[in-house]
Image (cartoon, rainbow, N blue to C red):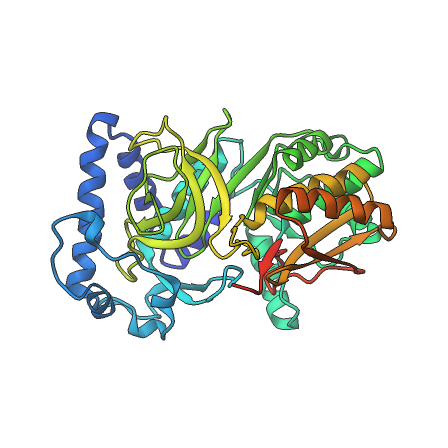
Amino acid sequence: MIKLFDFALLLGGFPLNVAKSHLDEILAIPESEFDDFMDDRKWSIVNYHLSNNSHYQKICNQKHFEKWEDIPIMKKSDFQLPLNQRLSKSYTSKNIYTNKTSGSGGDPFVFGKDKFCHALIWANIIRRFGWYGIDFNCSWQARFYGMPVDFLANKILRVKDFLSHRYRFSIFDLSDRGLEKIVAKFKSKEFDYINGYTSSIVQLAKYLRKQNLILKDICPSLKVCIVTSEMLFDDDKQLLEAQFGVPVVNEYGASELDVIAFQDPHGDWIVNSETLFVEIVDDAGKLVPNGVEGRIIVTLLYNKAHPMIRYDVGDYGVLDEKSTIKKPLLKKLIGRTNDFATLPSGKKPAGMTFYSITKKLFDDQGNVKEFIIRQTRINTFEIEYTSERELTENEIRRIEKVMGDFLEPDLIYNFVRRESLNRTSAGKLKQFTSLVN
């Protein structure tokens, strides 16, 4: 059998076999030696860019650092200029892999990775998916991601999906009628796994619950569901596992970097230490102990084409106290740094926190399908929702009371029922947005 996925990477000039061999060497390094390996690897990529990348030289404003924590933290704003002005010597857009961030966290930008780096990233992704019996060369994926509306771009993507053993569902119609069509496809095709945006996959699970259906019964070949790009709450994970009948895996990553953390079959959210170095720092940029919440800072260890060094992903998280240098564990992902509300009292709750409270209240009723929260003024929140029926006055008063008890009194809540909710151009559902910050 032709390994189409591997062949497509090799055809594009990405040295997958070399990358797989190098990954095996990294994985074979003993825990006792991994600290030295990581120290050497992270300083090697810094010194490379200090010598070969004029853009990074300007950011650092010096050519040598004594301590790692003195290296500047890079932000998305550092990449708001043409890609060719950010590439290292000998690299151009013609001899690297390029792509664009979705912009769901603000400040979208084009990024580049050298071909070995991109191949190494894929080798590691292939390894992780393999934990669940998934082989990209033959396993069929039910894909819940965005889809371009442009005719030509749409057809090109369909061809790429076919060659990669993927069938892409439209996530812009999650009505009962649209979900019925999705379920019908699962009846006619032997999918091995589901992969895509959390919010869309949760809607499928809710529809299955309403129809009293288990997806594994409909599609016996299904092995696993892997959700990504949006927060996965514990109750949603329980719903997915109950209605799909397969394990549900939480993936956390960034397109400009790599998969940052991926749950293994034991439920551990393992941070990628093979191609990344992940730090948690406070708002002043100082490293915090494991178990303490902070900003997630990531260094891409093998990208010579483009520096991503001590890069502020834009998320808050916590590393587990049990973490080691070779096997760091993500204990909790809290949300994006720009997803915090600012209240009249000066209190600054994380948007995802009270989103989860409202979500619990809505789920108790079983009426609301999806919703988003938007802070429009310092004392005003707009809650847009889709539902089978409009919320009653009693339901609204109850939600307002619980929200007021949790946040603070005298806040204003405007409830707006919609036929559907606006998603980003990539198809993501932005669950909380503050227009005040």
Q: Residue 410 versus residue 221: which sits nearer the camera?
A: 410
Residue 141 visible to the viewer: no
Which x, y percent locates residue 94? Answer: 35, 70
Image point (23%, 32%), residue name: 34
**Residue at 21% from the left image edge and 34% from the top image edge:** 35
Please indicate whether residue 115 sits to the left or right of residue 226 in the image: left
Q: Position of residue 224 (x, y in %)?
A: 60, 34
Q: Is residue 55 above or below residue 31?
A: below
Is 347 placed above or below 61 here?
Answer: above
Which picture quadrant has residue 256? Answer: bottom left
Q: Is residue 45 visible?
A: yes
The foreground one among 410 and 190 is: 410
Percent position (x, y) of residue 45? Answer: 22, 53
Q: Note whether 290 is above or below 90 in the view shown.
A: above
Looking at the image, residue 336 sits to the left or right of residue 222; the answer is left
Of 46 and 291, nearer the camera is 291
Question: How many badges with numbers are in the image?
Answer: 0
| Left or right of 313 in this view: 421 | right
The image position of residue 222, as x and y in percent, is 66, 34
Residue, x 67% and y 55% (percent of image)? 411
